[in-house]
Amino acid sequence: MHSKASRILILLTVIFAALSGLYLLIGGIWLAKLGGSLYYIIAGVVLLVTAFLLHRRRGSALLLYALFLLGTTVWSLWEVGSDFWALTPRLDITFFLGLWLVLPFIWRELNGTGSFSRVALSAVLVFVVAVLAYSIFNDPQEINGSLNAEQAEAVPAEDGVAPGDWPAYGRTQGGTRYSPLKQINDKNVGELQEAWTFQTGDLKSPSDPGEITNEATPIKIGNALYLCTAHQQLFALDAATGKKKWMFDPKLKPNPTFQHVTCRGVSYYQTPQAAATPAGTEPALCSRRILLPVNDGSMYALDAETGALCEQFGDKGRLNLQSNMPYAKVGSYEPTSPPIVTATSIVMAGAVTDNYSTKQPSGVVRGFDVNTGKLLWAFDSGAKDPNLLPHDDQKYTPNSPNSWAPAAYDDKLDLVYLPMGVSTPDIWGGHRTPEMERFANGVLALNATTGKLAWFYQTVHHDLWDMDVPAQPTLADIDDKDGHKVPVIYIPTKTGDIFVLNRTNGQPVVPAPEMVVPGGPAKGDRLSPTQPYSELSFRPKAHLAGKDMWGATIYDQLVCRVMFHQLRYEGPFTPPSEQGTLVFPGNLGMFEWGGIAVDGDRQVAITNPMALPFVSRLIPRGPGNPIEPDENDKGGTGSEKGIQPQYGLPYGVTLNPFLSPIGLPCKQPSWGYISAVDLKTNEIVWKKRIGTVRDSSPLPLPFKMGMPMLGGPVATAGNLFFIAATADNYLRAFNVTNGKQLWEARLPAGGQATPMTYEVNGKQYVLIFAGGHGSFGTKLGDYVKAYALPDSK
């Protein structure tokens, strides 16, 4: 006689299996009609039959389910191999239902349940456990190689930087993000501890947009650190203690129409007289100065010792970057990255609001006198004559391609290398003229003294995907196969390609052949039939397919597979569409503004590529989507969510990560990696997942899945590199040779910045600005944290 409790449990199991079967059958039919896998139809039918047999108390339900679970496991391995996180949604619910069925209070209530059925299902369950256990230690996405472990002993002689300093955004203006310090090394890094913490007090206000970010990498000269906050408050700190020396507040007044509130860093300049001043002698006022870009279109020059404004610079210390700028609304032109500073010039570029209107400011690059701030030259990338200086009421060219990421500089060649974006709006280009695209989406090399063009290399033609060059290029001298030094520039891009050019002439050192890409543009637009593909690339080798879709369970994975097949997707550079286009690599980019770190001694690059698809959908003009803003519009989007209007074009656009209905990425992890490239061979030697879901899931579980990142790595001669950047709040240290994690520190807020390292009073420190990132969703804060070895070390 069946107990009441057992009858209830059987009934609940029947209901669960029946509902699951019905869901998978209906969804599976839908998916099959779209050209997807037939597995879900089979799974739905099997679960419905299992539910029927359980309802009739038939022991054959266990044998049927054993065959189904075995088939599911084999199918899963066929689709994704031994990838634990890809196997999980296929096997989690199915495994636990099988485990439930072999529990005594279930199988004992079934008629004719022989030992064979129970043993068969139990054996399959053991097999599933073995498969999952194997997959934990055999990740097909990782590369477990090892670089040459030989350590470089000599301090680089040609970078012109004191070993203990970090005087520019990338330590050198060549953007290497490499330090010759090795007091902290792969043998002792595990002993790192917090040395000091400083809080800026600059936090998000109600008037800020969602895109408020703390992305600054501080600079260090002598015994002082200089850093800017999201609202461009400038702090000078004692490098040994973190104590505030002085602070300058430009009184930025943002509002929700700003697209960004961001400061990635400041720049430093000292006069030749200051360089020659004997040690211990007080320098003249403003002979050493800090240059601070501000999001309202200003730039300030301040004395590095006192924070006083340099009144001989610009208008009493302030330079108006909105001069001769068309459509000069506050917040529509934002200098978010530090300028390049040479012996004669300050080279300044800035960000322009994306996807808002065809009536936006210019992306002009300008050179200003390093002492007075006087305009020396301009390069207006959308003008017929880029070097023509405006006069009287003449303006620069609206919507010309802009350069928002940090630039790089070669002082021997006197060339500045600017990563260029597209002429905004980004996602439809039928209106663009040849001038608007001549210098878009590539690296622009200009003479820093005159602004004259040296060369230009385009990485994406007729960009419709927001595939601007997003990071500071990196300069290095690399041995070719004959042992000759080649002056190269590394250009990490959103597509995942790293273009490698001779920086003297812009010619490829690593081949980047043109490849045919999908056709079929939106109405009124056009396409480039080919795009350049660098042979040094982290771009996925295969196109995404239904098998790459993911979820927490088989249920939301099925939804993602349906969504995938409803979108237009023919691989990279699939054109935007009204149907909705899957953009992968996504417009967040495989590489972002963090760039790469290059150890020129060992000729190694450390990278942190991402892999997160986006969906773009063109929205034709119609109700609620006018072609021009109304008279009450204040300008700017204030958000990168919802319909981005693209006023003046036939379409608005939505751009969003490709997520399931429950908010998880539809592409299976990993979404973020760290990796090392041997620059002598241009081979990827090792690649590892980085980051956990601890700070982005409902339960704080430290599952290492490989997380998206904003920020870059810094490498040292101690065979180490440091990186925060991930969507969990950690600063981590890794072995450069093999990618093994050696240390981590929990951060009080998101670490969406690039760390740096320096030495003062004989002690090496590692520093990170942990302030979080609004649109990235990490915890906001105001922490500057430094780490060092214990004093006894």
Image: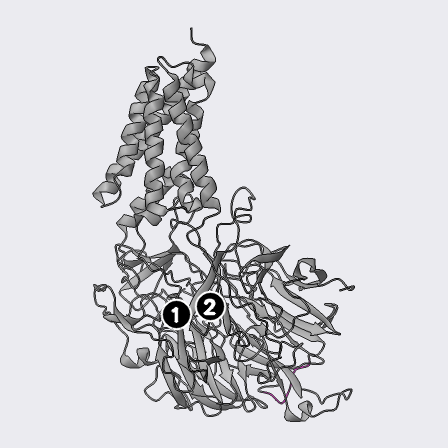
Q: Which amino acid does label 1 sit on?
A: Leu
What percent of the width, then of the height, locates residue 132?
A: 45, 40
**Magenta stretch prevailing secondary structure:** loop
Query: Where does the C terminus fall, quadrant-wise?
Result: bottom right
Q: Looking at the image, which residue sits at the far top?
A: 1
- For disc 2, the neighbor class at 10 Å (few under 14, some 14 to 19, many from 20) is many
Q: Which amino acid does label 2 sit on?
A: Val
Residue 355 vertical placement versus 395 (above, below)? above
What percent of the width, then of the height, locates residue 111?
A: 36, 12
Q: Please give the residue where the numbered disc 1 appears in the rendered image.
A: 536
- Residue 216 visible at all: no
Answer whether labels 1 and 2 touch (C-beta < 8 Å).
yes
Residue 520 as seen in the image, left or right of residue 556: left
Say if the magenta span includes residue 253: no
What percent of the width, then of the height, locates residue 158?
A: 57, 85
Q: What element carries label 1?
A: loop
Residue 32 vertical placement versus 363 (above, below)? above
Seen from the viewer's position, the closer of residues 626 and 428 is: 428
What percent of the width, then of the height, locates residue 511?
A: 34, 75
Which stretch is magenta? 308-313
Find the distance from the CA under tag 1 to the CA under tag 2: 9 Å
